[in-house]
Image (cartoon, rainbow, N blue to C red):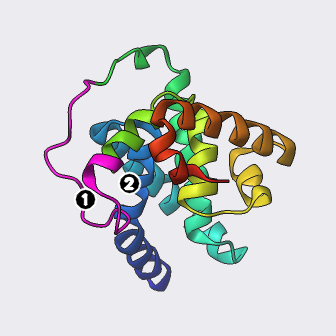
């Protein structure tokens, strides 16, 4: 019963943040919600193992979320194209001090990247993880994270232009 209460507390505390990360990775609020639910379901099933091994639950959840997204992208039925329209409401918990216009521009720019490159950029620069931690979560080497980060940031800078290049200063 105690383990279930621990999981419930984790899910309540982390669900919004996981959904935001999922949205930034896939740019679809409905898919982000599905990925968040899939992640929480897998976390619930693995919760005894996670607590027994004393793993970081949120770190584990991010890895499950990324794997769920990549699995989803591999399915043939994911040929859907997201509509280019602004969500009804931008979450209040997005980084303070950044205008809504800038956030939307960044989201559009992130859409130019592949799913893996987007995940690397988000983990490194949005979630502020080390190269090593990002490599472990994505399942690639440190050099791949460095190379893909550099290329992805160059793509973002080219799309954003000189006036917003400082948003991705490396």
Quarter residue 5 falls in:
bottom left
Q: Is residue 119 above or below residue 4?
A: above
Instruction: From the image, tell me which residue sits under label 2.
Output: 20
Of residue 60 and residue 134, the one placed in the foreground of this image is 134
Q: Is residue 44 above or below residue 100?
A: below
How far is disc 2 from disc 1 in space, using C-alphas? 8 Å
Q: Report the magenta residues as a range.
A: 83-102
Marks 2 and 1 in Cβ contact (< 8 Å)? yes
Decide whether the magenta segment is chiefly helix, strand or loop. loop
Q: Is residue 84 covered in magenta?
A: yes
Image coords of residue 15 (percent x, y): 37, 63
Q: Is residue 35 visible?
A: no
Instruction: From the image, tell me which residue sits under label 1.
Output: 91
> Residue 29 vs residue 144: left or right?
left
Question: Residue at the location (34% across, 62% down)?
Answer: 94
> Residue 152 vs residue 58: left or right?
right
Image coords of residue 123 (percent x, y): 60, 54
* Circle 1 Cα neighbour tier, 10 Å, few/some/many (<14 / 14–19 / ≥20): few
Of residue 37 and residue 137, the one placed in the foreground of this image is 137
Pick whichever of labels 2 and 1 is earlier in the sequence.
Answer: 2
Of residue 108 and residue 136, the one placed in the foreground of this image is 108
Q: Which mark identifies residue 10?
A: none
> Residue 78 vs residue 52: left or right?
left
Q: Residue furthest bottom?
A: 2
Of residue 97 and residue 11, the one placed in the foreground of this image is 97
Q: Quadrant of the N terminus?
A: bottom left
Image coords of residue 87 (percent x, y): 19, 42
Question: Residue at the location (64% across, 45% down)?
Answer: 120
Where disc 1 sits, the SS reads loop
Q: Is residue 74 covered in magenta?
A: no
Image coords of residue 47 (percent x, y): 56, 67
Q: Is residue 108 visible?
A: yes
């Amino acid at each position: 019963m105690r383990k279930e209460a621990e999981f419930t507390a984790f899910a309540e505390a982390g669900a919004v943040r996981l959904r935001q990360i999922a949205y930034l990775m896939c740019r679809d609020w409905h898919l982000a919600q599905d990925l968040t639910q899939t992640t929480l379901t897998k976390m619930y099933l693995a919760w005894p193992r996670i607590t027994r091994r004393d793993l970081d639950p949120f770190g584990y959840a991010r890895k499950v979320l990324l794997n769920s997204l990549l699995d989803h992208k591999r399915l043939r039925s994911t040929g859907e194209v997201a509509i280019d329209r602004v969500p009804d409401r931008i979450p209040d918990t997005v980084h303070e001090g950044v205008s809504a216009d800038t956030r939307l521009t960044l989201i559009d720019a992130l859409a130019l990247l592949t799913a893996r490159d987007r995940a690397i950029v988000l983990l490194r620069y949005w979630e502020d993880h080390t190269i090593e931690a990002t490599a472990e979560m994505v399942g690639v080497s440190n050099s791949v994270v460095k190379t893909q980060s550099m290329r992805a940031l160059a793509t973002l800078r080219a799309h954003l232009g000189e006036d917003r290049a400082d948003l991705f200063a490396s």
